[in-house]
Image (spheres, helix red, strand yellow):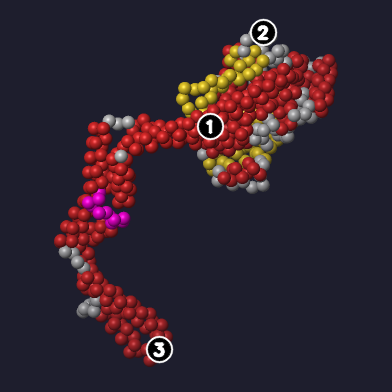
Amino acid sequence: MLLNLHVKNLALIHEEDISFGDGLNILTGETGAGKSIILGALSLALGEKVSFDALRDPEKEALVEAVFRISDAEAKTLRAMDISVEENEVILSRKMTGERSSAKINGETYPASKLKEVGALLLDIYGQHENQSLLHKKKHLELLDDFGGESIASLKKDVAEAYRVYTSKKKEYDSANTDEAERARELSFLQHETEEIANAKLKDGEDEELESEYKKLLNAAKISDALNEAYKECGDSAGGSSEKIGRAVRELHSVEAYDEGLSDLISTLSDVESLLSDFNRGISDYIKDLDFAGERFSEVENRLNVINDLKGKYGRTVEDVLSAYDEKVAHIAKLEDYDSYLLNLEKEYNEAKSKLENLSSQLSVLRQSKAVTLCALVKDALLDLNFLDVKFSMEFTKTPDYSVSGYDEAEFMISTNPGEPMRPLKDIASGGELSRVMLAIKTILAQSDSIDTLIFDEIDAGISGRTAQAVSEKIYLVSRAHQVILITHLPQIAAMADHHFLIEKDVVSGESIGSQGISTISTIQELYAAQVTNELARMVGGAEITNATLENARELKELADEKKKTLVL
């Protein structure tokens, strides 16, 4: 549920804070007052693309922050997305300057795409664009699958996995029918390659060991010179460190009896003498063991050339080359008994196709069964929404090829007048009719929809009178299962509000908002009691509010309150 929306320095908004409530939240105001800005701001918080032209003052930072209360299940889902959640609250925020934007979730920075991913779990926005999506058949099948719930979702997963196996086998089967001469050439080439790898007698990690030895052999002279010079400087020879430190230890021992405080210094220097003695023995032994024979260097170099040649052909590492060898041996076995391979592959391909066909058929049968139920419910809802004699159904066709979701294409069919034939929804529905169809479907899906908050942007377009009243009741029913935020121009719908917000455009002095001259800003406030009546009166009668329009508004609100008591989802 959306608890709060904070907007700063965006379009006509200087700075506003809106606290939404449960149930039906209505936003009203005159045309141009800035209602769409609220949805635009919320879309930014949900990760939509930023238009920097929307900043009210390009020199100042803009901020949009949306605070959601979420369920335990939603919190678990977000934690699985590596998003920290505390006290079942999520804060999505977006800061924007004239050149860049930043996005945060609960104070941690994320890309805007992550805001969009999280927002999709928390909120749905339905406007004229979403209603227009009903003109596309693909959307119809999506709505049906949503209605089908877990039974369809589970079967779709099985179909998707079967489709993955089927496409893999089909690709292999389609490429397997090569002619005999081509197979012979391929077999000969593979045998040459495997023989080449086998003759090399590679060992795991061999290349790394040889490269280390090669580096040592390549720099043999430098290593020898450095070791001998180090031994000369540190050894027992005249002027060497060992000889000097030994002399220093003896000098200190000669006066130790006269000063007990020298004991620690003598002990430390003796330790140094002992360590240097160990070092000299070690470096002496290392020099004795050095073997920089030219013959060994040639062997290592030749072996590395063989290995690197194979790595250039078959993989980055020796492990890759050996893995390629195993694959080629398996492929040789397949080519040497190609008839058996083809028979087995054909069997596997047919089994995969049969399984996909069977699962797709099951999914189609289930969809068509669910479609009967959905269309009956939509028809009833449309009759409630003041369609006179509507017929509503879903027509299924089978696609030429399989897809990840089966082989169904489905399209809503509708007849809105007695005696008219059923036609595709896209051919006959007006904007207002599309709005009512979408509302009818959302009313039905509301009972199982996992999204907490639904936003409707002027879904009442193109309707009035009795139809507007019917729409208001359906929207209220949806708000019993979800938080609904709705922008409307119709008083019949606004009267059903649990929380009513007024958006107004005012001209203010620049000083009051920290700018120069005169400014136009949008303000938002929640209305109560008489304020609600006055706004309904404005919506009923226009700019001039008379006693008659006030009385009409009061009666409209009272009737709405009484009607709400009788509506049960």
Q: Quadrant of residue 484?
A: top right
Placement of 344 over or under 550, stated as above or below: below
Q: Label 1 to label 2, Cα distance in Å?
A: 38 Å
Query: Where is mark 1, residue-wise?
Result: 359
Q: Nearer the viewer, residue 119 or 204?
A: 204
Is residue 472 at all visible to an observer of this figure? yes
For image coordinates 56% across by 27% down, the residue present is 364
Sequence-wise, the earlier of marks 3 and 2 is: 3
Placement of 143 over or under 75, stated as above or below: above
Q: Between label 1 and label 2, give the one nearer the viewer.
A: 1
- Secondary structure beneath label 2: loop
Placement of 289 over or under 540, stated as above or below: below
In the picture as drawn, the residue positioned furthest to the left comes out as 294
* Numbered label attached to residue 259: 3
For the residues bearing labels 1 and 2, Cβ distance under 8 angstroms? no
Placement of 172 over or under 397, stated as above or below: below
Q: What is the x, y in percent for residue 394? A: 61, 20
For the residues bearing labels 3 and 2, Cβ distance under 8 angstroms? no
Q: Between label 3 and label 2, give the one nearer the viewer.
A: 2
